Amino acid sequence: MAVNDVSFQIMEGEILGMIGPNGAGKTTVFNLISGFLKPDAGLVRFRDEVITGLRPDQISHKGLGRTFQIPQVFAKFSLLQNVMVGCFARTYVRSLAKRNAERILKAMGLFNKAEILAKKINLIDRKRLELAKAMSIEPQLILMDELMAGLTPTEIKEALVLVDQIRSSGVTIILIEHVMDVVMSVSDRVIVLHHGSKISEGSPEAVCKDKVVIDAYLGEEEPLCWR
């Protein structure tokens, strides 16, 4: 069983961190929320509306975006075209979609590479492009799946600036990460999954001190767990 009776809420404007060992069910939770999988039982509600069973495109039109651990770019499209695809979810006017895409690329630090093909950019820029694509649908909530994976410490700092920008714009965030100092520094609350079940939920400080979490995932109480 990939996900077993996992229940949680996220409040508007919050950053919720989701952690746990590999195979704990974190990405499966994202797939259930965003419509890539249909749950066998239970409901997914978004802004008081049941979205269980809707297609991913239907869910994204409601204002729920996501990124993927392995960036899912349109490799043969330019960066501008990649972002314009999502902008067409909100407008059929090409000139407006282009302006919106350019604005998002500027915010993500990619405007000077707008005409480059996505297959030619490096990992950090692919991560930036993932965020830009997620922002292109004008989301109210973004699911970020290991945005920091594979990045250098300097690149992680740059990515954190983007996360802060997105939150400041009013977007709510659920963040899956294995980089613990990232999770603990940006999250308002943290939930922990293990073997498909939720084993802990609370403030970053409380979760780091939870013996169940230490035994299942952290291994030991690390100073980086405290903000």
Image (cartoon, rainbow, N blue to C red):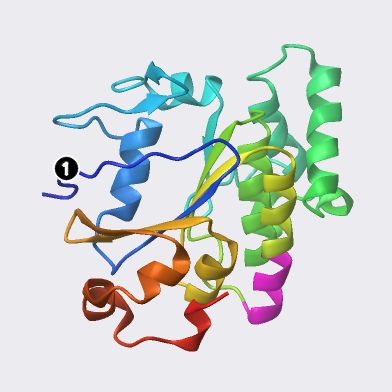
Quarter that holds the C terminus: bottom right
> What residue is at 74 percent from the left and 40 percent from the top?
169
> What residue is at 70 percent from the left and 71 percent from the top?
157
Q: Where is residue 173 drawn, in percent x and y?
A: 55, 45
Please say if 32 is above or below 1: above
Is residue 218 inside the magenta stretch? no
Work out whether residue 4 or residue 226 is closer to the camera in this orientation and state it: 226
Please say if 46 is above or below 37: above
| Chain part drawn in magenta | 152-159
Q: Is residue 52 left or right of residue 196?
A: right
Q: Quadrant of residue 138?
A: top right
Q: Quadrant of residue 45?
A: top left
> What residue is at 39 percent from the left and 68 percent from the top?
206
> What residue is at 28 percent from the left and 67 percent from the top?
22
Is residue 158 inside the magenta stretch? yes
State whether residue 153 appears in this view: yes
